[in-house]
Amino acid sequence: MSVTGADTAAWRSARPAVIRGEEAFHAARRSRRRATLFAMAVLALCLLVSAWMSEAHPVRLAEGLPRIGEYFARILPTLHWSTLFAGTETEGSLAFWFYRIDDWLLLLAETANMAAVATLGGIVAALPLAFLAARNTAPTPWTATLARRFLEALRTVPSVVYALIFVWAFGVGALAGVLAIALHTTGALGKLFAEAIENGDHRPWDGMVAAGANWMECCRFGALPQALPSILSYSLLRFEENLRSASVIGFVGAGGIGEELYKVISFNYYEEISAIIVLIMLAVMAIDLTSEQIRHRLAGAL
């Protein structure tokens, strides 16, 4: 195809604009690259300052990591294949490793019950607060602000701190643990429930308002059905987390398997430490598998 003089003239007239466009593109690219490098440098500086303030020095890490491996080596049980399935009197057997499994299973059941009751109490308290905290369902803007600040205050305090307070008030036992986990669960689930409610379609709510429904009826029939799958999923996930929390707060006398774990750690009963940890891990795995099946069935039903 031949190039005419008109085409050549058009190209010459358009060339300066093309060159300016290319220069602007490269300038914008260089500016973005400089901004990215600057952001990475600031991030690296912040990480270095954080590591210095938290005393996470490379020398200390290099010295401490082998000791972690040494501790895990100590808590590993001494098992022998020839005596693996022998009785509790035979060293190197599973029965000898889990020689107190009856007591530990009872404490683990108590821990699971603490987590279940605390999760249920947290759900019951968090759900109405979530409707007050969600901006699309709150009666007034200041109601949403106050509800959000209240939920933040509840989840800001760690469950261990709540447990210390309740142990002082109610004494050593599972009640302190249940109340501590329930309060923290209320703050955490309230935020998640509110976000699930805000992500829903607001048209059913508007339709019910137009039909003359009150605020509670709008929450029940206009917002809750849409958010229910997410609410159930968050609740089951929180139950798994609360089982681990119930194991930890036992360190401060709040009942459950955590008290026993604290004792064996304090007295350096290494093989008992690993046995209790294995039982907790198996319990968490079982709850995780069960929750997964429940979530799938509920998702299909809803």
Image (cartoon, rainbow, N blue to C red):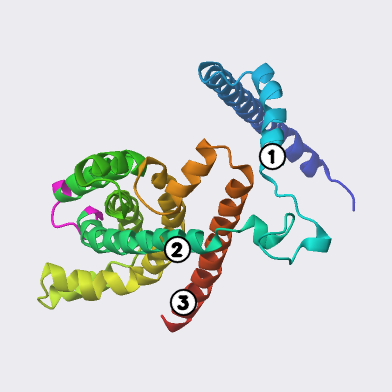
Percent of width and height locating residue 31: 61, 25
Percent of width and height locating residue 63: 70, 21
Residue 86 as seen in the image, left or right of residue 301: right
Spatial separation of the CA atoms under disc 2 and disc 1: 26 Å
Spatial separation of the CA atoms under disc 3 and disc 2: 33 Å
Residue pointed to by mark 3:
299
- Residue type of the residue flagged with mark 2: Leu
- Residue type of the residue flagged with mark 1: Arg
Residue pointed to by mark 1:
74
User: In terms of sequence position, does the residue under pointer 2 or pointer 1 come before the other?
Assistant: 1
Q: Nearer the viewer, mark 3 or mark 2?
A: 2
Label 2, secondary structure: give it: helix
Percent of width and height locating residue 88: 65, 61
Could you tell me which residue is drawn at 44 percent across and 57 percent down?
243
Spatial separation of the CA atoms under disc 1 and disc 3: 45 Å
Q: Which mark is residue 89?
A: none
Q: Based on the picture, tell me whether residue 61 belongs to the magenta stretch.
A: no
